[in-house]
Image (spheres, helix red, strand yellow):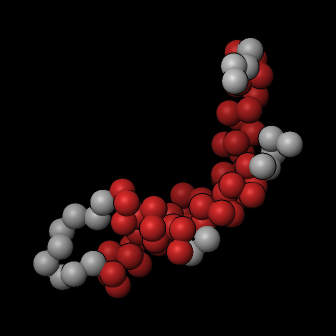
Amino acid sequence: MSLPPEKASELKQLIHQQLSKMDVHGRIREILAETIREELAPDQQHLSTEDLIKALRRRGIIDDVMKELNFVTC
């Protein structure tokens, strides 16, 4: 699906506003810190993208974001 540049820009702005409203970045930071503290073995230094995605899914963050985006786009 291709959007005209002005529509793509408008959609990007709407998505950014919605994500800011939901404080997604803050929620992700909290989950990342919690995941590192609680779920990683003490000798494990690296948190993979897959580990983070799993943590976000378990806490419903990804579902919340998708519901909100379906924010905006419908």
Q: Position of residue 28 (x, y in %)?
A: 50, 64
Residue 29 visible to the viewer: no
Which of the 4 image quarters holds residue 12? top right
Left or right: where does residue 26 sit relative to residue 71? left
Which of the 4 image quarters holds residue 34? bottom left
Taking the spot 53% from the left edge, 75% from the top edge, the residue there is 58
Which residue is most to the right?
Answer: 74
Q: Position of residue 61 (x, y in %)?
A: 60, 66
Which residue is most to the left?
Answer: 43
Front-most of 58 and 34? Answer: 58
Left or right: where does residue 3 sit relative to residue 24? right
Left or right: where does residue 66 sit relative to residue 70? left
Say above or below: 55 vs 66. Answer: below
Q: Position of residue 48 (x, y in %)?
A: 30, 60
Which residue is most to the top?
Answer: 4
Taking the spot 41% from the left edge, 69% from the top edge, the residue there is 32
Q: Quadrant of the C terminus?
A: top right
Q: Quadrant of the N terminus?
A: top right
Say above or below: 12 vs 65. Answer: above
Taking the spot 32% from the left edge, 75% from the top edge, the residue there is 36
Residue 3 visible to the viewer: yes
Q: Position of residue 73 (x, y in %)?
A: 80, 41
How many numbered dots are placed on residues in this image?
0
